[in-house]
Image (tube, grey):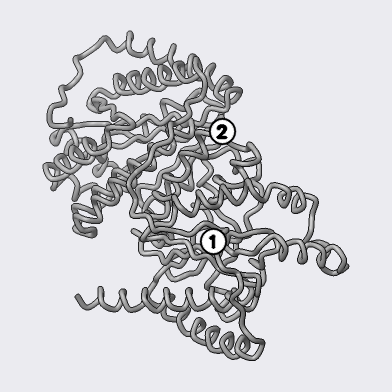
């Protein structure tokens, strides 16, 4: 791609400037239609140091309403964000429906620099390329317009620009040691950029612009953006087709086949609870020190005992090192983004524990059954969720998923108790009764969810909860065992 790129031919400056003026007016007019059609747009501007990425963005946005676009520059990721999955700065920054976002360098620059610094292995490089392709495809399938531009200049041109910037006291700060290193290793970067672009060109195409002719590059970038927006506005919002990748799935029983009779005595419960909570407190210190992130997901029937289970799990933990996220219906700003966004923004830092009380699986349960998303959306979600969870475990997270299971008679008894006990009445709503009437439909949806998303790296655990005490002990045992194994793996990797 870059190796074969040919420079653009000289053009009359006045003609190019006139085209830019017309394109600016067109883009400004499109902004209102973008809002009306709720079209989210992400423009990724990558390129060489001193190629003019910032200036290009400035020219594009000059006539736009600043209330409805955002410019993000995550090229230098703060240390705090380095404790998250590598896509975190980009996945958490995606725009709302009807808005534009411009990325001044992004996932390409991040991956290439780490590869050339030998900070990631060849295997990790491949994982990151795969994650980028998945991320871009998920955005496209959710109706996002994604435009990827690479601003290209040759080695001699870069040297002259860096030298000019360095010699001016007002601009020398813009030349960083990384920029100088990139110039010294120009040929290595050229090869690495070329490989990355070839490996990430299938879903969303790359567009290479000649950065040596600045006005021409502005004209070409604006022409690309205006043209893509025009096409998107002229048709219905794109909805991706469902497809299946071959994940290593584990065989799961249907809910109706699960024996719900297991129970534990009060005496044994108290003894086990004390022992497991003590061990969990010890392990929390170890995972914090070793910077192992932990994500624990709770799903289950209403009144199954998720809250009590979570309380027993959270009690021994240091409150500074964990968060519990109760997930309710999405808020307007969450509905206006790809559905995984609100979970990306709640992920823990390395060394911390995050507990979700309901999760991204709402996509294939309540959103599916209540018609909050289209059929293609929830059918596609099984694969998207498997990809998301694989990215978390590739990052090094311990990921545990619990389905808290009870039968219908137990649920009815607990509903009735809540309704007849004043201090518990807040726990029961009309929605709970409505969902109970749809038990068969929800059971079928859960069975399908368990079959399609219990993977080797992120298995489901069905927790029998007719006896709440038994359920709490079983969940705690699973968590303790998983954390012990993670700490052992981390120790082995340290001394390989």
Q: Residue at x 29, y 43 (%)?
A: 108
Residue that carries the numbered disc 2 in the rendered image: 374
Depth check: give the residue in front, 215 or 290. Answer: 290
Q: Is residue 156 above or below residue 397?
A: above
Q: Quadrant of residue 133?
A: top left
Q: State the residue at coordinates (40%, 78%).
A: 289
Asked whether disc 2 touches disc 1, contact meaning CB atoms under 8 Å apart, the reply is no
Return the residue nearer the eye: 175 or 217.
Answer: 217
Quadrant location, the C terminus: bottom left
Q: Which residue is mark 1?
A: 257
Q: Pick the quarter of the image with the N terminus.
A: top left
Q: Nearer the viewer, residue 439 or 248?
A: 439
Give 61 or 246, whichever is nearer the viewer. Answer: 246
- Which mark is nearer the camera, 2 or 1? 1
Q: Position of residue 419 (x, y in %)?
A: 84, 62
> Residue 478, position in %: x, y?
47, 74
Judge left or right: residue 41 versus residue 115: right
């Amino acid at each position: 791609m870059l190796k074969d790129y040919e420079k653009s031919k000289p053009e009359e400056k006045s003609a190019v400037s006139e085209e830019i003026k017309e394109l600016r007016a067109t883009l400004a007019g499109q902004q209102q239609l973008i809002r009306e059609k709720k079209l989210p747009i992400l423009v990724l501007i990558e390129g060489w140091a001193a190629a003019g990425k910032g200036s290009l963005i400035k020219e594009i946005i000059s006539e736009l309403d600043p209330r409805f676009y955002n410019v993000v520059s995550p090229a230098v990721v703060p240390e705090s964000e380095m404790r998250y999955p590598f896509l975190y700065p980009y996945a958490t920054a995606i725009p709302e429906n009807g808005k534009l976002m411009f990325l001044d360098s992004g996932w390409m620059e991040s991956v290439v620099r780490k590869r050339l610094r030998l900070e990631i292995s060849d295997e990790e490089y491949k994982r990151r390329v795969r994650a980028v392709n998945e991320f871009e495809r998920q955005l496209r399938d959710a109706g996002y317009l994604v435009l990827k531009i690479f601003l290209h200049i040759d080695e001699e041109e870069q040297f002259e620009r860096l030298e000019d910037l360095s010699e001016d006291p007002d601009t020398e700060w813009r030349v960083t040691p990384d920029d100088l290193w990139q110039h010294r290793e120009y040929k290595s970067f050229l090869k690495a950029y070329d490989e990355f672009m070839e490996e990430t060109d299938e879903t969303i195409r790359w567009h290479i612009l000649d950065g040596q002719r600045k006005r021409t590059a502005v004209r070409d970038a604006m022409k690309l953006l205006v043209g893509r927006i025009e096409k998107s506005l002229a048709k219905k919002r794109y909805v991706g087709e469902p497809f299946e990748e071959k994940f290593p799935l584990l065989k799961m029983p249907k809910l109706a086949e699960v024996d719900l009779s297991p129970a534990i005595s009060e005496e044994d419960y108290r003894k086990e609870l004390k022992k497991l909570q003590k061990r969990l407190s010890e392990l929390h210190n170890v995972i914090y020190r070793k910077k192992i992130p932990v994500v624990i997901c709770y799903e289950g029937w209403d009144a199954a005992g998720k809250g009590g289970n979570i309380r027993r799990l959270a009690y021994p933990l240091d409150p500074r090192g964990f968060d519990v996220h109760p997930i309710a219906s999405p808020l307007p700003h969450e509905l206006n983004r790809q559905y995984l966004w609100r979970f990306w923004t709640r992920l823990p830092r390395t060394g911390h524990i995050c507990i979700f009380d309901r999760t991204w699986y709402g996509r294939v349960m309540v959103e599916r059954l209540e018609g909050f998303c289209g059929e293609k959306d929830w059918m596609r979600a099984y694969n998207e969720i498997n990809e998301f969870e694989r990215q978390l475990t590739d990052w090094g997270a311990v990921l545990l998923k619990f389905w808290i299971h009870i039968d219908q008679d137990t649920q009815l008894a607990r509903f009735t108790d809540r309704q007849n006990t004043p201090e518990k009445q807040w726990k029961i709503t009309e929605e709970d009764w409505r969902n109970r009437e749809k038990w068969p439909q929800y059971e079928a949806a859960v069975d399908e969810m368990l079959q399609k998303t219990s993977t080797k790296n992120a298995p489901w655990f069905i927790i029998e909860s007719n006896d709440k005490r038994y359920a709490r002990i079983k969940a705690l045992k699973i968590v303790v065992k998983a954390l012990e194994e993670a700490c052992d793996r981390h120790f082995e990797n340290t001394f390989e």
